[in-house]
Amino acid sequence: MSWQAYVDDHLLCDIDGQHLTSAAIIGHDGSLWAASEGFPQYKPEEIDGIMKDFDEPGTLAPTGLFLGGAKYMVIQGEPGAVIRGKKGSGGICVKKTTMALIIGLYDEPMTPGQCNVVVERLGDYLNEQGY
């Protein structure tokens, strides 16, 4: 299966009539593996900041998580595994796997919990596969 198929078929899937606004799979080095239409153009330093927070949990909390120039307030996640953020009526979930970052963005009426399930389920699967 191609990386794009993981984004299209698994991250953008329908959950109770809702779906992510955009999603991507990005390598730890910041390289784009696959993305949905409308995924923000991110800067390398934004991915570096996310990776640093996985290595040193809590580093993003004071400044916020930035992706595509948008600032998300960091909320509870799982140190070293998941970072969650909120911005207005939407938010972000980032799951770290062995080789990649699974990123999902959502907006109401999708709930944070629905976004987390979609992103983290794919992340867990890819971890089991060695990715």
Image (spheres, rainbow, N blue to C red):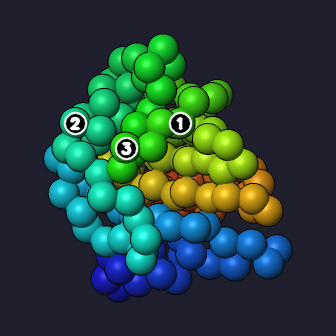
Residue 91 in percent (x, y) is at: 61, 47
Residue type marked 3: Gly
Q: Which residue is mark 2?
A: 45
Q: Which residue is mark 3?
A: 69
Residue type marked 1: Tyr
Q: Quadrant of the C terminus?
A: bottom left
At x 48%, y 36%, the residue is 71
Tell whether label 3 touches label 2 (CB within 8 Å).
no
Is residue 58 at all visible to an observer of this figure? no
At x 69%, y 79%, the residue is 14
Question: Compared with residue 73, is residue 93 higher up or lower down, i.e. above or below?
Answer: below
Residue type marked 2: Glu
- In the image, is 3 to the left or to the right of 11? left
Residue 77 in percent (x, y) is at: 60, 32
Real-space CA distance between mark 3 and mark 1, rounded to the nearest whole angstrom: 10 Å
**Which of the two marks, 2 or 3, is nearer to us in this view?**
3
Residue 67 in percent (x, y) is at: 39, 45
Q: Which residue is mark 1?
A: 72
Question: Compared with residue 47, is residue 31 higher up or lower down, i.e. above or below?
Answer: below
Is residue 9 at all visible to an observer of this figure? yes
Earlier along the polypeptide chain: callout 2 or callout 1?
A: 2
**Which of the two marks, 3 or 1, is nearer to us in this view?**
3
